Image (spheres, helix red, strand yellow):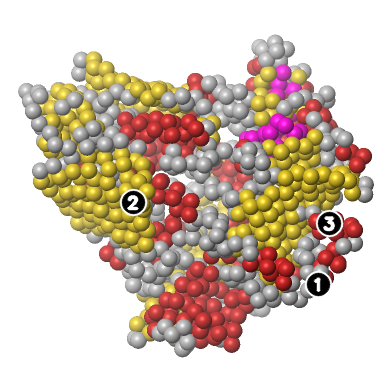
Amino acid sequence: MKKIFYLTLILIVSSIYAVDLSADTVISEDLAKLMAQVPPAENFPNANYYVITESTIVTLSPDGSYNREIYFLAKLYNFAGKRELSNYKINFNADFQKVELIRARTINSNAVIPVNEKSVNDISHPNYSDAAMYGDFQQKVISLPAVSESSVVEIHAIVKTDTNTSMPFGKLVVLVDEPPTRKRFYEVKFSKGVELTWKSISGAPKSRKNATSLIWEITDYKGENIENNTPSLREVFPTILYSLSKTWMDESAKISKITEPKIVVNEKIKSATEKIVGDKKGKEAISAILFYIQQNFTQIDTRPEYFGYEPYTAPKILENGSGDSKDLSVLLAAMLRAIGIDASLALVTSYGARIYDIPMSYQMNEFLVIVWLDGKKYFLYPSQRYADVGFLGRASGEKSLIIDPEKGELIQTDLLKASDGNATYNFDINITPDGKASGTVTLECSGIPAMYMRAKFRDQKKRKVKQLFQEAASNISSGANLVPDTLLRGIETNTGPVNAKLGFTIDNYMMFQGEMALLWFPDAPFMLLSYPAITEQSRDFPLYNTLPQKVIFKYKINFPMGYELVYAPPEQKIDNQFGNVIIYGNNIDNTIEYTVEFELEKCRVSPEKYKDYKELIKTFMKKGNRIVLFKKIV
Amino acid sequence: MFSNQRKIIKTFKTFFLVVVTLSILTGCATSSANRGKLGFAKPKFKRAPAELMKKIESSGDEFTVSNTHAIMIDLKDSTIFDENGRMDNYSFNLIKPITIQGIRNYNSFEFPYDQQMMDVEIVYAMVIHPDSTIEIVPDSLIIDRVNSAGVAEMDIYWTNLRMKIVNMPQIRMGDAIAISYAYKFKKPYNEGLISSGAGFQSTEFMNHAEEIFLIPKSKFDEINYKIINDNDSIVKFSEYDWKDYHVLKFEVDSVPPIVPEPSMPPGNMFVPLMLFSNVDWSEYSRMNWENTESPMKITDPELKSIVKALVETCKTEYDSVRAISLFVAQDIRYVGIQMADKEGITPHDVNETFKARSGVCKDVAALAVAMLREAGIEAYNVLINVQGYVISDVAMNQFNHQIALARLKDGREIFIDVTDDVCIDLLPGHYSKYGFLVLTEKGENLKYFPLFEPKHNEGKIIAVTKIDNEGNLTGKIEYTGMGLSDEILRQIGHYIQTEDDRRRFISRFITEIDPNAELIDFKIYPDPVTDLTEPAKFIIEYKIPEYAVFAGDYLLFQPSLASQVFDLLSMNIDQAISLQDRNLPVRLIAPYRLDISETIELTDEYVLVSLPESADINNKFFKFDTKYDIDGKNVIYISKTILSEIDIPLDDYKDFREAFNNYRTSRKGMLILSIKDHRL
């Protein structure tokens, strides 16, 4: 290898390497030394790669534009690492950002191969392909050449951001997460006189601060391998947040300055609103407008930190027939104001992440609307098609930022409880002496289970609805067939309960084994339950159940004469801070009646308390709580 | 691989029209528009004419037409070919959404295209309101972007693949949408090839659809066309001469919509469609051989020396094939970067693919073929369709993947999918019935892989378990496989590489046996799983506290493998049989066989009272049997699952479903033990 001396910043005191573009196939001695010191893969059996250096320097200019210089150097350990890093991606919004690639290369033991220009492609971000009307959000994909499972990959780039009034300066950065890291460096540079608000959370170090920069640095990070269903990354990994706003009111005012002028109440909006509302008043009117937008507008997924905060005007949104959460909220607010309802925009995290007390709005990703009516406040979620007035989903119990020139503040939202909605199944089954069962199951549900049913059935073709009922029957038990004459009510609106009923027959439901016989309680026809699995024996990280649920199964089973009950699930009750499981029942003559109740709150479960959560789920799923044993009467 | 962008356009959802093209050519378009007809040309009228409004109103609504979100009132498509096979396609759609979902579905239109090969022009898009006012979509609402959705996920980053997006203004019930667009090819994919096809059914109701092809008269004698899957004779055909063209016209009326069903076959196996081509398979093979040959000359000395090194210790020709194939499969990663002209079908220069150590299927297959030839082995590129079905009646592009073929001196043919880096057999076990075309200088005919035997994909699970007096179970499982079963084990080990992730993945399975299950140890062999000299194997050790149910004087439990949680290939069948009634047959992934044996050591204090009934399910396509043997204080559970076919015809579905449901039921039986001295 040619050795060419060139200027470099000394590794120990500097955060990144200066690059000599003319010698991209040569590596410096310092770099070679660093690579030689990378610990072997055996030291990190749960790592796919090792980050040698990851450095970010953000430089804020007085005019509001800023650059983000990225340097990334990593050693791959295996195929999964190769898959993850061989196509390195940098997100940017081409409307106001440019990416300058300074260096990208693969360093193997026998060669250093810089990327060629054909291997650098700007593509529309695949996750936001239907958001083209909101901006040109792209990915610069750097397909590194000749990457093997032991390569070192090196990327150096600058993302330049123009002055953009719809993107307040600030960021939430998870400094390190799963991969082990020798050094993670993050610096924000700014002019004298500029004051940044910042916060370190979840174990991030405090920043080193001087008059014109904030620096965070983590060294010798051992890496983690998080389990499934953890809270958002910011809650479990060292994270920093920074912002130019001093207070939440500042932050709200910045955004409000952009959004408020778009909440235009003109004749078009008034006339459209009047048609929808008719002579409804108060909460009824609010509900009607919300439903109109949820039903009639195509929802598009965007994030403010990628696309900015500037919505279309309300009349334009009405014309468009589609919108992201900010657009739909602007339209909703305008229509509410058209009938004199006090309405403002609000921001939440749709996935239930914790909001920290630093005025940095990118902690939140979704807009909705808050109204004040008769002394009460209600949240309205126009981008959630099946949400009733007040529903916040995963955002419930977390904080919300009111976007309002006068009422801007961070408020606590009410926590949705399991008892705020539930699903009750009533099974009524008759078994004939040959073991064949026939029966019905009814479902009455409200809250979240009702939303699931609406999402499943509303707007489906007739044949599809028939298919869904057939699938539901086959979920009850193997071999179950649907008996026509089904019922489904309450799915056309977002308010009130949903009721369903279906009849079924099941061959071989009661299984005979000599003198004994057994059956299993039927399963739920509609999959309305979803909770974090308990596959781990213990956890290092908290577990997060993001939505509360409550399901009640009531079984009434008439079994054939000539058999006596030998075993049915014993009465049990587990009640802890995460929920409860209650099982009880009785047997009279040839009928068994049983109830299984399962309730789970929205909760973050610490590793120490995981065993309590596990106990709850285990009891609910336990085979012994689902089986009934009979013996022939001699 | 996008071997023909046209394929993207020609889904069985879109149907196209020609009349307007003819109008343009005869000078009628303008006058048509003035007379109130709507078609390809941008209309001049400011309000929709009465005739058009009547057509829209009388087309139906959600009360007269069921199982559809929109009515395709008029779909017209016209394609004009030149003698070289280059084409221009003009389309006109008149659509009326009739449900809220339909309004949402047609809020925007996407027109994907390959910039290297074609341009797309949106002639006009408009909404026609019930009061006959029209709203034309301004150009500002038409966006042109790189098309990455669906391809970036496969690591294909071809920037030549783009999309025009037309965002419609708000559509209300009663509105209709009219959209006219043109795809103009810059050049043909294959010089001299005149071919195309169209489907005549979609997931929406079709009121009327026309497909017109203008073929140069000088070329028409070469054309072979066919209407396929038209059991009810819905496709009306006519043909005539017009100027220098011979015109083929296909039209349909009142076609009911398809409602998709789980595990349904590819659309071209049941949708009425037409295909035509001016070549036979042999000529098509030859044409594509021409496309693929020139980039395959090895000039890189390093590549040559690698070939030499790979084969010099090989004892047989087959060993050499294996060595080269595995090098390409495992050292060249799958990623799509635009480098060549006709990127969709032309392999990159093999020296470039080697240097970059990356490419998509056409690139890596070509590299493998070049390396095999360098080693003196007769080798060819092969086109194949891995998601659908290739219709043999007409030779045209129906392919979406490329593999390699080595023809050995002993007469054997070795097919290799070099995009699969953990396939011990070189050809994956789900290739049953796939159509393929070997590309040779003389050309070859289309062929199909046979239906693989179930034992080709055999899995074997042996378990030894023990239940103690407290009802706790401990066990150890050994899982091996062949074909697809082997590949599944390897894929798990390949994609889930860290210890913790592997442990979690397997824990998910054993907690399906019982939520109380705990993984004690898990090992994958070989490690790394890319070592294809050894069969793959999982060893799983687990325990399940309180596994058995204490039911009064009885102890109940199942063999831990009786729940068949490791029967991974049956998940596909589960989905397929969820429907009682089907309108479409079933197509499954692959035939397979799974043999399970579990030896359960029983507790001393309990005695066996009752065993589950043995299952003996013997359906034409699916067999399952279980047996329980008693050997001292051991109970031996044995099960055999055999799926012997991937296509289940409608007539056989009911029996097949019943058989599989019986299989599911048989998984629920329990061993019933009682305390000693309490025998029945």
Q: Is residue B292 depicted above or below B481 in this figure?
A: below
Mark 1, chain letter?
Answer: B
Q: Is residue B238 visible?
A: yes
Magenta stretch bounds: B379-407
A625 sits left or right of A85 in the view:
left
- The part of the image, by quadrant, that contains residue B336 is top right
Mark 2, chain letter?
Answer: A
CA gap between label 3 and label 2 equals 53 Å
CA gap between label 2 and label 1 equals 55 Å
Please name the residue that numbered disc 1 is placed on. B44
Q: Secondary structure at mark 3?
A: helix
Q: Secondary structure at mark 1?
A: loop
Q: Disc number at residue B21? A: 3
The reply to whether callout 3 and callout 2 are in contact (CB within 8 Å) is no
Q: Residue at x 20, y 18 (%)?
A: B633
Mark 2 and mark 1 on one chain: no
Please name the residue that numbered disc 2 is placed on. A502
B61 sits left or right of B547 in the view:
right
Seen from the viewer's position, the closer of residues A44 and B418 is B418
Q: Quadrant of the C terminus of chain B?
A: top left
Q: Is residue A630 depicted above or below A328 in this figure?
A: above
CA gap between label 1 and label 3 equals 17 Å
Q: Residue at x 67, y 34 (%)?
A: B390
B285 sits left or right of A275 in the view:
right
Amino acid beneath label 3: Thr
- Rendering coords of residue B425 (x, y %): 58, 23
Indicate which disc, 1 or 3, sits on the residue closer to the N terminus: 3
- Rendering coords of residue A305 (x, y %): 56, 68
